[in-house]
Amino acid sequence: MGHGGNVIEELKADHREVEEMFARIRTMTGGGQGLRDVVDEVTIELVRHSVAEEQYLYPAVREHVQGGDGLADKEIEDHAKVEKMLKKLEQMDTGDPQMTPLLHQLMDEVSAHVQDEEQNLFPMLAMACTPEQLNDLGDKVRRAKSMAPTRPHPAAPSSPTASKLLAPGAGLVDRARDFVSGRGKS
């Protein structure tokens, strides 16, 4: 969850973790608890990552990168699509015939988002910010991920202010539910 380094290094490490989980999903045959466990891991990581980006990365992009408002808006739209897919997956039985196509759609959407961030957004942010600003953002993102929800909440507001106010409470409730159910412990 927390890797260290500046914001770009931190988020790229998250991307590699999710790609590894996707690779595990691609090699799985059938459904069952094994698939549910990996889908839960993916969901936890993507929700935490998205919340942290919406709280700190995208406001920094808006502030420091030329044309940042449009870039941030596009990334937030990507997150909304992914969160809706995660919510559907959370409610789906692993034997549901719609699960595999939805998982592939999720993996394609997330992979395109990751590629866009790493090839476009991150280099622009690196050029626009000082190393100190990037390190500070990395610290903020790590703190946000530690308090973030672990389940998708697609109806929750995505503004940085609302997210900073609501995410810790939702995160606490989600982590309590995860503890009781054993979700995310495999």
Image: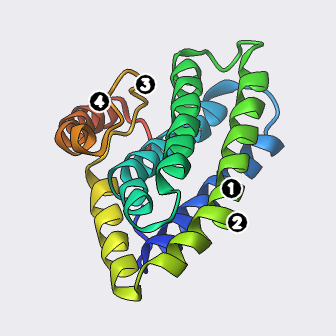
**Other residues around mark 2 within 10 Å, as few (<14) / some (14–19) / many (≥20):** few
First in sequence: mark 3 or mark 4? Answer: 3
Residue at 77% x, 13% y: name it.
97
Residue at 53% x, 57% y: name it.
67
- Left or right, 47 with respect to 105, comes to left
Specify the amino acid type for callout 3.
Pro
The quadrant where residue 42 appears = top right
- Left or right, 186 with respect to 114, comes to left
The disc at residue 116 is 1
- CA separation in Å, label 1 and label 2: 5 Å
The disc at residue 66 is none
The disc at residue 177 is 4
Question: Can residue 118 be seen here?
Answer: yes
Secondary element at tag 3: loop
Look at the image and name its color scheme: rainbow
Q: In this view, does 98 lie above or below 12?
A: above
**Other residues around mark 4 within 10 Å, as few (<14) / some (14–19) / many (≥20):** some
Residue at 61% x, 73% y: name it.
123
Q: In this view, does 9 lie above or below 173?
A: below
- CA separation in Å, label 2 and label 3: 27 Å
First in sequence: mark 1 or mark 3? Answer: 1
Q: Dividing the image into 4 quarters, which one contains the N terminus? A: bottom left
Residue 139: horizontal and vertical position, in percent?
31, 72
Secondary element at tag 2: helix
Secondary element at tag 1: helix
Q: Nearer the viewer, residue 127 or 43?
A: 127
First in sequence: mark 2 or mark 4? Answer: 2
